[in-house]
Every structure is written in structure tokens, then in C-alpha cells.
């Protein structure tokens, strides 16, 4: 039932009306798109198309890596030595297990450094502070 709902959802409408966390897209535009990839989980091909269309319409030039639901991000991209900023603890746990650096995007928790603004991790001085916590 949930799977069917997610596959039939009007993703274009939903994505266009979703709240973007703390100006993340505008912040991304201030950094070299070759240095930052976007890994995004999708539940259907329609969702993937809608997300890609949305990012491109917002002039986001970064690589967009689609991660099908049920597959860990570390199975798509080598986690070792790479930073994952995510709002899902399961993704962060797996990323850390695979020798990646995990940063939680959201409210503070005790397990991972957290940020509330994407600029905190993209700015090298702020990133050093986060990682030294």
C-alpha cells in the first residue's frame, strides 16, 4: 500500500511545494558543483525525474546521483573518506561503518555532529569545527 502510494504520488507537485531547508539550494550555488554531488533517495522513476527537473530548474549544476529505495548510499558511492550530510540516521550509520564522515542535517543528537545550515559543512573553517566536536 505504501509502495503503491509513493509510486503514484504527484512528485513534481510535491517537490515544487516542499520546504527547502535553510536556503540549501542557494548555498550550493556558491560552491564549485564539481566538488559536491547530490545523493538523493527515490521511491519511483517519477520521483527521480521530478527531482532532477527541479534541481535543474533551480540552476543546480551538481551531479545528481539517484539512490533507489532499499539500496544504501554507500553501495552507490564509495563512502571511505567522503562526507555525507543526511537527515536519516540509518544512512549515517552505514556511511560511518564504511569509513565515511557522517554529519546529521537537523536537530542536535549525541551520535553525529549536526548542522542546521548547509554552509556550515561547505565552508572549510566551519567544517573543521564540526569535525573537532
Image: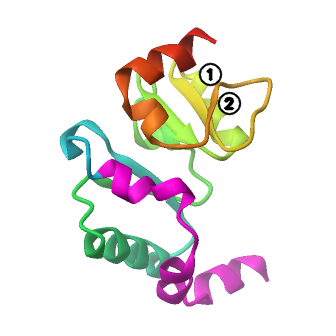
What crowding class fits label 2: few (fewer than 14 Cα within 10 Å), some (14-19), or many (20 or more)? some
Q: Quadrant of the N terminus?
A: bottom right
Q: Nearer the viewer, residue 112 or 91?
A: 112
Q: Residue at x 47, y 85 (%)?
A: 12
Q: Quadrant of the C terminus?
A: top right
Residue 4: within the magenta? yes
Residue 38 can be seen, yes or no: yes
- In three-dimensional space, the C-alpha distance between marks 2 and 1, rounded to whole angstroms, equals 6 Å
Where residue 27 is drawn, which disc sits there? none
Residue occupying image coordinates x 60% and y 23% = 96
Residue shown at 27% from the left, 61% from the top: 60
Q: Is residue 66 left or right of residue 36?
A: right
- Is 20 a magenta residue? yes
Q: Secondary structure at mark 2?
A: helix
Dot 1 corresponds to which residue? 97
Dividing the picture into quadrants, the one containing residue 65 is bottom left
Q: Position of residue 55 (x, y in %)?
A: 34, 68
Is 37 situated above or below 112? below
Number of the label disc, if any, that sits on residue 93: 2
Q: Are marks 2 and 1 in contact (CB under 8 Å)?
A: yes
Amino acid at each position: 500500500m505504501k509502495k503503491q502510494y509513493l509510486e503514484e504520488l504527484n512528485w513534481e507537485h510535491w517537490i515544487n511545494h516542499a520546504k527547502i531547508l535553510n536556503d540549501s539550494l542557494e548555498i550550493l550555488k556558491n560552491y564549485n558543483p564539481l566538488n559536491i554531488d547530490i545523493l538523493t533517495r527515490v521511491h519511483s522513476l517519477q520521483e527521480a525525474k521530478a527531482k532532477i527537473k527541479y534541481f535543474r530548474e533551480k540552476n543546480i549544476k551538481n551531479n545528481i546521483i539517484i539512490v533507489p529505495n532499499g539500496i544504501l548510499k554507500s553501495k552507490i558511492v564509495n563512502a571511505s573518506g567522503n562526507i555525507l550530510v543526511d537527515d536519516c540516521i540509518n544512512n549515517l550509520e552505514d556511511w560511518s561503518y564504511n569509513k565515511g564522515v557522517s554529519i546529521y542535517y537537523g536537530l542536535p543528537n549525541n551520535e553525529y555532529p549536526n548542522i542546521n545550515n548547509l554552509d556550515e559543512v561547505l565552508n572549510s573553517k566551519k567544517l573543521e569545527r564540526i569535525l573537532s566536536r
